[in-house]
Amino acid sequence: MTIWIKGGELVDPVRGVVEESDIMVERGKISKILPRGAFLEAGPGLKIIDASGKHVVPGLVDMHVHLREPGEEYKETIATGAKAGVVGGFTSLACMPNTIPPNDCSSVTEFILSQAQKAGLARVYPIGAITVDQAGEVLTEFGDMKKAGVVGVSEDGYSVADSKLMRSAMEYARFHDLTVICHCEDMHLSAGGTMHEGVVSTRIGLPGIPAASEEIMVYREIALARLTRTPVHIAHVSTEESVNLIRRAREEGLPVTAETTPHYFHLDHNAVIGYDTRCKVNPPLRTPADVEAVKRGLSEGVIDVIATDHAPHSPMEKDLEFDRAACGMIGLETALPLTLALVKEGLFGMAEALRKLSYNPSRILGIPGGGLSTGSPADLSVIDADTEYTMKEEDFHSKSKNSPFIGVVLRGRNDLTMIGGKVVWQRDSTHIDRR
Ligand SMILES: [Zn+2]
């Protein structure tokens, strides 16, 4: 089967260009990329995807999701999370280890990969836990987990409090060529807090989490990266000083990369005033000045990646008093429009947006994807950057609906997702011609 994707604007984050090109896909791979109109119509067996007025982009890569399986399948399964991913334009997802049990050994890693294979949707890349049972005491078997398929290690959901243990983890990870993804939180300093500590928490009477609880650990991880010369990736950056610390580390030439998520550049702590538990996340939504700093970090390239921290929860964990509710919001199906909003604002261009959503996370994890070039697997999405719509609860394919963007007018969405040359999802209105 040959597929011709015609009439679209191809976005190539590797070369940093947007150009009018058609793509030919054969045997799961991109076989040709030619200027628009250069292809001649071929004979029978040709499938034509009309991408007129749309952008053809490398499949999005989310390096930070929670798929909840094993253990909390009532919130999400690998299959429903992968479905939400492909609807949102993602072809690859890296899933964090804080499941029940955690992904702290090769048998859990193998289980995740077999469930992903059965789902047959997005490519799933497991992240292994740094310590056994994420208890912060004994390192896991990085080598075993790597053989089973993990692409990185993280204690996400927690920090490794013991700095000596974290140093060993980095040295061990470097030996096994695994990316260390750091959830930065001084768990003692944040204990008991439910939102950002500041004027809003004081006014509405909720216990606060100071920005310092994140920044202390960002500083420590950078110091350990300097000591061990191990590449470290700082997850979900939310404060101005975290951005400054990462900028300085980069200027020093340290192997430090970073991500943020759409909620840290679209929402601030004022969103919590109505005690909306959908806005309860960890790290918490910060001040408007922090939001500006995160955006500046993105535009300067100090923050390499936009991930989602997709964190599904059921009403059982969310329809509660604010202090009792769980942290996290879903994000796979809103990340693309929320990132395109920054392109619209002029913060960066389309190619740079795809660098942060696709090329950079692939490069940091050392996984395929992130570009559109001849010979590479045909993992791509066809997006309509201009359509405006109101996000409705029933529009989500995730099993959970904990998104504060329900009822919000968004602009831009994914229309078709192809993985390895196979169309795994398409919007009903997408036109595909079969000859
Ligand atoms: Zn985290």
Image (cartoon, rainbow, N blue to C red):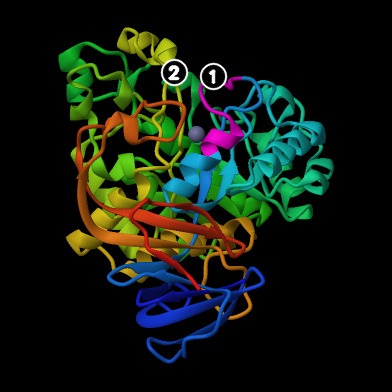
Q: Nearer the viewer, residue 115 or 169?
A: 115
For residue 162, side relative to residue 353 (left or right): right
Q: Position of residue 132 (x, y in %)?
A: 74, 26
Secondary structure at numbered mark 1: loop
Q: Could you say where residue 131 lies in the image, as x and y percent from the top left?
A: 71, 30
Disc 2: which residue: 314
Which three-letter amino acid code belongs to the residue tagged 2?
A: Ser
Q: From what the image shows, is residue 133 above or below residue 233?
A: above
Asked if disc 1 and disc 2 are in contact, CB closer than 8 Å, the reply is yes
Which contiguous range is marked in magenta?
Answer: 72-81
- Residue at 35 percent across and 74 percent down: it is 8
Above or below, 404 relative to 251: above
Instruction: Looking at this view, name the residue that lies furthest to the left.
Output: 203
Which residue sits at x=30%, y=32%? 285
- x and y, in percent, of residue 172 in the image: 77, 46
Q: Amino acid at mark 1?
A: Tyr
Q: Is residue 233 visible?
A: yes
Q: Quadrant of residue 190?
A: top left
- Can residue 304 be seen in this snapshot? no
Where is residue 406 drawn, in percent x and y? 26, 32
Q: Which mark is residue 338?
A: none
In the image, residue 212 sits, relative to residue 320, either above or below, namely below
Q: For the point 34% across and 57% down, which residue is it? A: 298
From the image, tell me which residue sits under label 1.
Answer: 74
Label 2 secondary element: loop
